[in-house]
Image: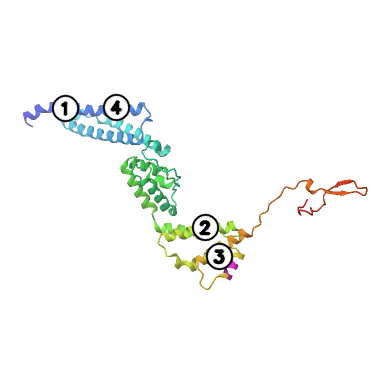
Amino acid sequence: MSDSDCDNSPKALEGLLRKRASQKGVLTKHFNYFRDTDGAELDRQCLSIKEERLRATFDRFEKLNLEICALNPDADDCDAVETKYLETLTLIKRLMQKLDDNQVVSPPPLQTMSTKLPEINVPIFVGKYSEYKPFIELFNALVDRNSSLQNVQKLFYLRSFLKDEPFDLIKNLPLQSESYTEAKTLLKDRYDNEYKITNEHINILLDLNPITKSTAGNIRVFVSCVKQQLASLKNLKHDIKSWDSILLCILTRKLDAYCNREFQLIKDNKPSVSTLIDFLERRALALENAERTQVQFPVSKAAHTVTVKDVAGATVKSAPPPLACTLCAVAV
């Protein structure tokens, strides 16, 4: 080692010690803040920023400490500082987890925005495959294509319309603009599964409740459910017309004996699902028309009093007949 190197070493060491002391002070400041306060005034994004700064500060401290130890091994000051760093990092992680666990997601106040979203109840998506496409199309129409909203606001709305597994899928993404596209991608990759969606619609048809009694209401509920599932399958580009034989076998088993027998009598040699639906709709209408509307008229006691005259010509009021009034045929 040259004489110049020896002369510069004390000055270099002194400079490094000052820099390390500065980084140590920043770490201690972070430690004291989170030790003395509960951090309740900080949101998750602020906590994330503080965590990043804490890590960067400790990285600089370690590098300076290594340079100092190379010049003077007795000047190592890492253990105590590392303990404070780890304790501070643990406190931050706990606060972030607490926010995630207790967070009640609600959309930002609409009155603060330049453009108000339409007042409409978007169905909460809970992870059912067959409901994903209707949900995301409605969300895109109301929120995603609203140019007055920032991406972070769109992400807030998206989180508010999710529950259970879909919410868990994106809840740990930081509330920042860049997370919005990632959140939509995660949902699409998870739930935009045509195979699973098709299976759900078919299973609904297979599990339809049988019509045990042919009432207009029961038939209309049955027909409505069938139409919805077939329309959804058609939107998925399935050729449902080629499924007529299979679908008819499934659906006619759901009919009560009288309804099934009547359909067998009117169908031709190549019936279709449309034929069955038309038959059921006509039967429901006929049952509605055939139902009698019972209207009860108020019957006063005086209306049923019979006036007669006795043998002396005096007027006498007698009780009504025991079975029914002969004027209105209402039993009394």
Q: Is residue 193 magenta?
A: no
Return the residue nearer the eye: 258 or 249: 258
* Percent of width and height locating residue 145: 35, 47
Is residue 109 shown to the viewer in this render? no
Disc 4 vs disc 1: which is toward the camera? Answer: 4
Report how far apart the C-alphas of labels 3 and 1 lie in the structure. 94 Å
The amino acid type of the residue labelled 2 equals Ser
Disc 4 vs disc 3: which is toward the camera? Answer: 3
Return the residue nearer the eye: 270 or 91: 270
Element carrying mark 2: helix
Q: Give the quadrant of residue 91.
A: top left
Q: What stretch is highlighted in magenta?
A: 260-265
Element carrying mark 3: helix
The residue tagged 2 is 224
The amino acid type of the residue labelled 4 equals Lys
Disc 4 vs disc 2: which is toward the camera? Answer: 2
* Percent of width and height locating residue 56: 25, 35
Report how far apart the C-alphas of labels 2 and 3 lie in the structure. 14 Å
Residue contact between numbered discs 2 and 3, judged by CB atoms under 8 Å: no
Residue contact between numbered discs 3 and 1, judged by CB atoms under 8 Å: no
The amino acid type of the residue labelled 3 equals Phe
* Percent of width and height locating residue 88: 32, 31
Report how far apart the C-alphas of labels 4 and 1 lie in the structure. 21 Å
The residue tagged 3 is 279
Q: Residues within 10 Å of mark 4 (few under 14, many from 20)?
A: few
Of all residues, the one furthest to the left in this rendering is: 3
Of all residues, the one furthest to the front in this rendering is: 313
The amino acid type of the residue labelled 1 equals Gly
- Among the two numbered marks 4 and 3 on one chain, the one whose residue lies closer to the N terminus: 4
**Label annotation for residue 15:** 1
Residue contact between numbered discs 4 and 1, judged by CB atoms under 8 Å: no
Report how far apart the C-alphas of labels 2 and 1 lie in the structure. 81 Å
